[in-house]
Image (tube, grey):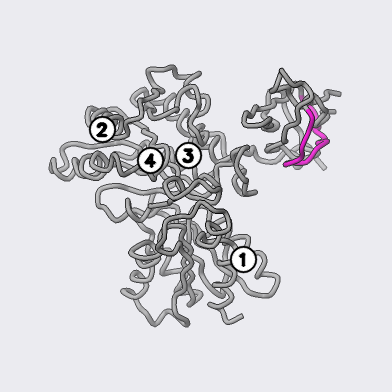
């Protein structure tokens, strides 16, 4: 199982919170390695999160939800 | 459930779909290049060129100084010499400082040369309000451009059309003004509409310029609209459907050429029409739709034409005032109810 974590965009404040801006995949879908999963945002900067493996994705947070950097946002089984 | 059933079509935001269309055309034709303010390292302030600099380098993705008349004029010159420039005017509101290049040169050189000189150029620009950006950063102004002969005008409302219309615009030998509303781009930092993310085919494909699309079929009235207002109209249509009122939503997608046939066909079927337009009310798109119907057969209307547009005032900065002038779902719903007598 792969844990997908919210990336650290603000390195000077590791505990900073961000927003899960857009999910490009849905809960329970099959994803492939390298596939674009979501876009996240901390303050005004945003970053894409790609899949590090293949499998069925389970989303742990909803679109628009506030998340602390480094927290698990999905699991790929 | 099989794997295939669980895997949906690939989804993109409108901004990413535009970038994919541009990148595919840049790969297949080395005459295609991009220039404008902050289109390079920044990736376009509304995400229209993100990643292009990395793939194609600074000779094909050029940041320009803040001189719209200079770089749009340079684009016209490059197009005349056989290139296919995509030039970004960051906000359409800035057209005032470069309009001579746009409507006296880009739009007229083909005519003035007796058809000998083509200007295959895309002028890409961001339009629309709803996020308190004030009177000089919130206008749509598509009717201003559509009024002037010599330019095609496309205004996609969703990711799939945005990519297909971009590819069509780049391949077209005429100057095409490509206008996208900031509210449909799917940007992380702007209030997002659910329909700003949607399925987009991975291969190259064209969406024909000048063809409207029935975004939702209905029988009781036709909502003729475009861009972000398509999303609002679909939301209203879904709500009214619960009460037995079925709105047809026609997404114009292009203003020049205008798909008058599609308008007349839909209005001929429903007998009622509401025009929803985020541009100014007078001397604009809604009046053109009314004239199109009146010239064909005013008797096709069972009720007077209704319109929801921006009253003839500058777009306010204050959020409550801005909401009062924009074609919000509330204003669309009220007008639709009035139109069908519900």
Indicate which disc, 3 or 1, sits on the residue closer to the N terminus.
3
Mark 3 or 1: in front is 1
| In the rendered image, the vertical position of residue B299 relative to residue B20, given as above or below | below
Q: Which mark, by number, is residue B169?
A: 4
> Quadrant location of the N terminus of chain B?
top right
The residue beneath circle 3 is: B205
Magenta region? A54-68
2 or 1: tag closer to the N-terminus = 2
The secondary element bearing badge 1 is classed as helix
Q: CB of mark 3 within 8 Å of CB of mark 2?
A: no
Q: Nearer the viewer, mark 2 or mark 4?
A: 2
Sequence-first disc among 4 and 3: 4
Badge 3 element? loop
Residue at horizontal 69 percent and vertical 74 percent from the top: B243
2 and 1 marks on the same chain = yes
Q: Which mark is residue B73?
A: 2
**Label whose residue precedes the other's in the sequence (3 or 2):** 2
Residue B132 sits inside the magenta stretch? no
Between circles 1 and 4, the one closer to the viewer is: 1
Among numbered discs 2 and 4, the one appearing first in the sequence: 2
- Rendered image quadrant of residue B244: bottom right
Image spot of residue B181 (x, y percent) = 49, 47
Could you say which is closer to the camera, residue B254 or residue B68? B68
Subunit of label 4: B
Q: Is the residue B246 above or below the residue B113 in the image?
A: below
How much space separates mark 1 and mark 4, taking CA atoms? 31 Å
């Amino acid at each position: 199982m792969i844990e997908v974590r919210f990336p650290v965009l603000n390195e000077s404040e590791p505990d900073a919170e961000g927003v899960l801006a857009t999910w490009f995949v849905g809960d329970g879908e099959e994803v492939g390695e390298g596939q674009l999963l979501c876009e996240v945002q901390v303050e005004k900067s945003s970053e894409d999160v790609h899949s590090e493996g293949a499998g069925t994705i389970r989303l742990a947070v909803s679109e628009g939800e506030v998340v602390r950097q480094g927290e698990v946002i999905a699991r790929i089984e | 459930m099989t794997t295939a059933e669980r895997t949906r079509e690939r989804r993109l935001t409108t901004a990413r779909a535009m970038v994919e269309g541009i990148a595919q055309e840049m790969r297949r034709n080395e005459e295609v290049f991009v220039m404008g303010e902050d289109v390079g390292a920044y990736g376009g302030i509304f995400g229209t060129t993100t990643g292009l600099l990395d793939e194609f380098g600074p000779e094909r993705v050029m940041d320009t100084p803040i001189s719209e008349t200079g770089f749009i004029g340079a684009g016209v010159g490059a197009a005349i010499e056989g290139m296919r420039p995509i030039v970004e005017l960051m906000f359409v509101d800035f057209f005032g400082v470069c309009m001579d290049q746009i409507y006296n040169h880009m739009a007229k050189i083909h005519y003035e040369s007796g058809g000998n000189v083509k200007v295959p150029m895309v002028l890409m620009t961001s339009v629309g309000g709803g996020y308190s950006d004030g009177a000089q950063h919130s206008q749509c102004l598509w009717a201003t451009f559509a009024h002037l002969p010599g330019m095609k005008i496309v205004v996609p409302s969703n990711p799939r059309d945005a990519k297909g219309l971009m590819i069509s615009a780049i391949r077209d030998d005429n100057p095409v003004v490509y206008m996208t509303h900031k509210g449909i781009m799917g940007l992380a930092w702007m209030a997002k509409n659910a329909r700003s993310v949607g399925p987009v085919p991975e291969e190259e494909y064209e969406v024909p310029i000048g063809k409207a699309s029935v975004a939702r079929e209905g029988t009781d009235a036709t909502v003729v609209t475009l861009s972000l207002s398509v999303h609002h109209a679909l939301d209203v249509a879904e709500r009214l459907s619960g009460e037995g009122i079925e709105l047809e939503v026609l997404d114009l997608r292009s203003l020049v050429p205008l798909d008058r046939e599609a308008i007349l066909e839909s209005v001929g079927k429903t007998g009622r029409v509401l025009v929803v337009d985020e541009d100014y009310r007078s001397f604009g798109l809604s009046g053109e739709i009314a004239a199109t119907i009146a010239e064909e057969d005013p008797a096709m209307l069972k009720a007077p034409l209704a319109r929801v547009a921006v009253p003839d005032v500058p777009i306010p900065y204050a959020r409550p005032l801005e909401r009062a002038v924009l074609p919000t779902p509330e204003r669309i719903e009220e007008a639709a109810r009035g139109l069908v007598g519900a």
